[in-house]
Amino acid sequence: MATPLKSVTVAVAPLAAAGSEAAAEQRLPLTYFDMIWLYFHPIQRLLFYHHPCSKTHFFENIAPNLQKSLSQTLRHYLPLAGNLIHPLNSGMPELRYVAGDTVPVTFAEASEELDFNYLTGNQARDADKFHSLVPDLPESRTEYSEPAFRNIPLLAIQVTLFPEKGLCIGFTNHHVVGDASTIVGFINAWSSIAKLGQNDGVSVAENISLPFYDRSVIRDPSGRANIFWNQMKVFQLGSPGPNPPPANKKTRSTYILQKTDIQNLKTLVSAKAPDLVHLSSFTVTTAYVWSCLARSAAAVGESVADDEPEYFGFAVDARHRLDPPAPAGYFGNCVAFVVAELTHGRLRDEEEGFVAAAELVGGLIGKKVNRKDELMRDADDWLVKYGPLMGKRVMGVAGSPKFDLYGTEFGWGKPVKYECVSIDAEVNESISLCKSREFDGGLEIGLCLPNQKIEAFETFFYHGLKY
């Protein structure tokens, strides 16, 4: 695995209010939306920027500006600098920031074996090449006070220079601190402050939406948070380690569906399923990828019975779907779960597999996602219902077309590439999904699979678009 030639790690603290030495303490209880992610592997994202500069300029100018702007941003995002407080005996877990808590930020120079142009391409690339660009979360530490608990850090950042080529910013966060909406909101806030060069970060509210912290908007009359906490202590669903394991012998590839491709897929589904009401870009894209993955199984020698279930699971932002709705800027996790199921034989069928998948996904969105009373109806059973699916034939999706990380500017122009590295660590197959950088109305799909399966997938993916 490639390692940086030179690096320095600094501890960045939130900017204190005028007249104070440190930011005030902040504590947030975990809601039932958060409890689900207690033992999930960290989420890792990369943003690449084409910005040729020297090592001297990087360490003497860019690094100090990023540290200063990050401190200003963390003033509004204190939990990210804090820790997950995980009780060992009694009590409930919570997020806690206290004076002295910081975010570790590593500034590094990439090794010569890492090629900026290679990493930012769409072609098949060695997945291991990306892992030196994302930081590990610091090790947790145990406090043997009464009651005893573990302090688990929530965020780490790494900025890597490719001399005279560009920069890469890597983010690693514990999922328990927030979903994609929360983390993308933080990244957008930081980039805005860094680009604008504000002196104190106070005027950030004029440019972005500040996070909303009042947890009372997540109503829990049945005590679902306590139920989930007790279940999670027993089952500990998710990765056992603090950081994702490296992807061995995997290949990372990016696939683009242009607006015309998406429209052609919609037309194909409409012709065979004219009564399907919800036929969105998300519906046809995920259904198409799901069917191509199923068809790839046989091509790489996987022995799968035709009657074996295949699952597609996706998270849905529940903020505006709650009753009453939570604010768009609500900080934390607030996603509900939807799972589609088809038999392997039907999903891999060359003629009907994609259409059957689109009908199922579109039907679930129309009948469950878009109906407030239906989306949360099975929430009490999420862990017992979906937990057993881990390790089975499940395709998940990280990200959403509504999050435009390609619009994130730190002052060096828009990113040239976004990668979700943590899909490498999924027990099940997972894809990343975001808006296309190059094509208006297009979508970008990221996969990380064994090389032979990537090749098989690619054949089915492009062949199907010829119709």
Image (cartoon, rainbow, N blue to C red):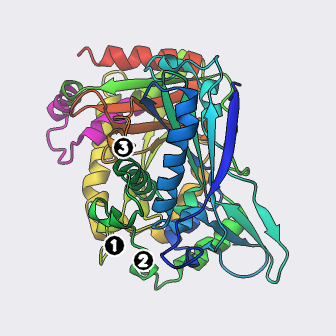
Q: Which label is found at residue 326?
A: 1
Q: Position of residue 146 (x, y in %)?
A: 82, 84
Q: The C terminus lies in which quarter of the figure?
A: top left
From where the camera sits, is residue 315 visible? yes
Tell me which amino acid carries mark 2: Ile
Q: Which mark is residue 408?
A: 3
Q: Residue 117: give its label.
A: none
Confirm or deny contact between disc 2 and disc 1 (CB under 8 A): yes
Q: Main secondary structure of the magenta part?
A: helix
In this view, 431 is above or below 154: above
Q: What is the distance, in whole Å, between disc 3 and disc 2 at their CAs?
A: 29 Å
Magenta residues (range): 263-290
Quarter holding residue 127:
top right
**Rendered residue at 51%/54% (across/down):** 68
- 447 or 164: nearer the eye? 164
Whether residue 264 is in magenta: the answer is yes
The mark lying in front, picked from 3 and 1, is 3
Q: Position of residue 92 (x, y in %)?
A: 66, 78
Relative to 466, 214 lies left or right: right
Q: Is residue 37 left or right of residue 268?
A: right
Front-lying residue, 165 or 445: 165
Disc 2: which residue? 218
